[in-house]
Amino acid sequence: MIAETGLAALWLAAMLAGLQLLLAWSAVAQGNDDARRLIRPVAIAQGVLTGLAMALLILLFIRSDMSVYLVAANSHSAKPFIYKFAGAWGNHEGSMLLWVAVMSVAGAAVALFERELDRRTHIATLGAQAAISLGFYAFLLFASNPFKRLDPPAVDGQGLNPLLQDPGLAFHPPTLYLGYVGLSVAFSFAVGALLTRAVDARFARAIRPWVLAAWIMLTIGITAGSYWAYYELGWGGWWFWDPVENASLMPWLAATALLHSATVLATRDALRAWTIMLSVIAFAMSMIGTFLVRSGILTSVHAFAVDPTRGSFILALLGIYIGGALALFALRVHTVNEGARFDAVSREAMLVVNNLLLCVILGLVFVGTLYPLLTEMMGVRVSVGPPYFNAIIGPLAIALMAALIFGPLLRWRRDETGAVLRRAAPALIAVVLALGAVIAFAPRPVGWLTAFGFAAAAGVAVASIAPLWKRNLRRTPLFTYGMVLAHLGCAVSLAGMASESAFSQERLAAARPGDRFEIAGTTVAFDSVMPIAGPNWTAMQATLTVSRNGHVIGVAKPQARFFTDPPTPTTESVQMTRWNGQLYLVLGDALEDGRWQLRIWWKPFVTLIWFGGGLIAFGGALALVGRVRRGRKQGRAAATMAEPGAAIPAGATA
Amino acid sequence: MRRALPFLLLAVALAAPIHAQTALPPAPYADRQLDDPALEAKATALMHTIRCLTCQSQSIADSNASMASDMRSEIRERIARGEDPEAIRAWLIERYGDWISYKPTAEPILWPLWGAPVLLLGVGGALAFRRIRKHRKGSA
């Protein structure tokens, strides 16, 4: 009954989305007042229904209802509770339902909370949101129904991939999806504003909090995903330029660019057409990311060709929506005038440089990720991996950091080169000092890219707090603090990356209990190996005593686990965090002669990578709160001033 | 035959659990570092750019698969013998195809990959530059 209710809720929601689209058309094109009043409740009801469907699917997983195909194929009754819960979206159908649920809940949020947009554009936006939702409802209902029954029911489920049985999984995909799908809101805003020809500073102020919210979620999702890969996969790396990682990075890059160009549009009424274009690109990247991950094309083009239904479906949606939006853009771009002008030495110009670099990086990640698929279709299998991306993206990222040193110190519209250089002087001194220190004092020679990474990190760290210099800190708006923290987070993260790549030490050993190893001034003593058992796994667990200068600083118990359903070996590494880095310990296989493989890394300041990511997200959150608060305040002020005029329906101005 | 080779190797590697039970000697340098840190660093750098053929998106440095172990051992031994890392990469590509190297080669089919940065920066930079210049003229 639960599954049928869920399916019914989905169908109803899909019908409501269709209705929402018709109402939006009727309200915007024909000025129908009833349609205008009805559209918000419809959008909200749609959000409630898909939220309900998602909740019901989670309930089915918690109850281990093996008469539902999806549960039987992806869950197991012996799984710990949290993985039954999170397992609901650890598979194709469930994750697509999550996608649709987030999308329509976001639509409901736009209906409920958006106040900045003029009424007509607001309704057009809801129409656009309904239009994209419809495509995904179709995908869900016709090509990936999560509520399909299994007759006869299975005795028990086939289990969840043990790699995914980790607290990281419970939160990583939902945050990433909130980000992906949050960008659908930016897309709908852009389409709405194009339809009603309302691309201006007000539009940018309206879109900014939504983009910011999506961007925060993407930042958290990517940071958490990187840390999850780091500790769960047990090979000590934190980013591999894997297509799945790139699929999440591309929307983030586009959203970062969009955030900055929307700021230019909101503050200076410039870059109008470009901001619209970026909104479309950002959501296109979300859809491409979903396509890459969900179609199976990444394993092999041939794997995709064997069962192309799902992949082609997403590809068709991508073509329809992005193609449609671009066509609309081409039709309407002449009505969007260029906006305000600015000098070559100005904050706008530096933000153009920011957008240029972010988009070039985005383009290269895109090309590098898809090129192997292209050559495979031509019969040549090639790999494009870290050597390519590091060599190409690294210098561009450093250039981006250089722009970040100057950007916040520049004045809007026009500035003097000499004055800018004086303001940036402390940061530039930091760059030179850091570069000198790395060259002079590094324990071993570092590559030039890493050296510049350290230098840029130092410069950005100093430059990022410069906007607070000589200001009344209590009167500085919250969103300025947000910007400062987010930029500081970039410096922190970059410093961690440079340190990890330059100074990591690795120790591989075949060890017997009783052996001791030295790494980076730390002694690791291999005490014993014992078998232990968990709820759905067994493991060999090593006991390692870690000491420094004769003092024991901790005991680590890394495991080599073996999961039973489905049978899979995994490594449970242990990270011992110190203020200046992490000791990373992995227990490998047993060797024939009774020895065990041990892998030990010392990674100085590696935690800064994710700490910086967290700081970036936190800065974003401060900026969001600051912007929303100021918007509320200004909205109230405007409402009291324009009291008599407020009664005129927005559509009357059209 | 060259095309079928990866699949044969794949089949062999998939049968790894059987190997583990036979008395085959393990690859000596699969998880043993070279004594000279400089050579070991060279070997590690190379291993991080060689794809594990039996895994999904992993380098042989990060993989527990037995085929990856064999390759690690082979690479360390060759480095210890004084071979150049790029020569070893070329030898691996010769045996297993371009797919094995995460570092794209300079073959014609990959020219667009290396041309893309230049093209994107050039076109994007020109567009941005024109815009800013135009603005300046207008405001002057």
Image (tube, grey):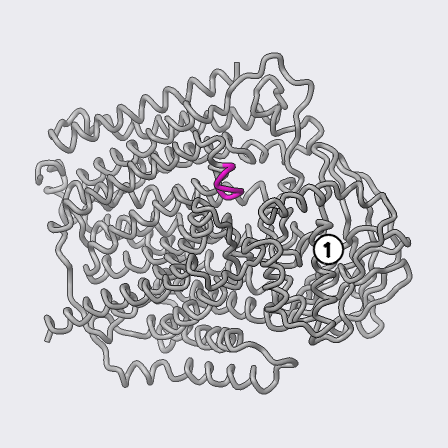
| Residue A468 visible within the image | no
B58 up-or-down from A427: above or below: above
Per the image, is A298 magenta? yes
Of residue A85 and residue B96, the one placed in the foreground of this image is B96
Disc 1: host chain: B
Question: Of A513 and A522, which appears nearest the observer?
Answer: A513
Q: Which of A502 and A64 is in front in this view?
A: A502
Q: Where is residue A187 in the image (x, y as percent from the top left)?
A: 29, 44
Left or right placement of residue A269 versus residue A490 in this view: left
Mark 1 residue type:
Ser
Q: Crowding near pointer 1: few (<14 within 10 Å), some, many (20+)?
A: many
Q: Does the magenta stretch include residue A413?
A: no
Indicate left or right for A640 with A209 as reference.
Answer: left
Tag 1 residue: B69
**In the image, residue A3 lies at what x, y percent?**
51, 18
Q: Is A540 above or below relative to A139?
A: below
Q: Which residue is drawn at 75% across and 75% down?
A: B36
Q: Is residue A628 left or right of residue A592?
A: left
Which residue appears at 38% of the width and 20% of the height? A11
Q: Can you say which quadrant of the picture contains the C terminus of chain A?
A: top left
Camera sees residue A169? yes
Q: Position of residue A186 (x, y in %)?
A: 31, 46
Q: Give the range drawn in magenta.
A: A297-303
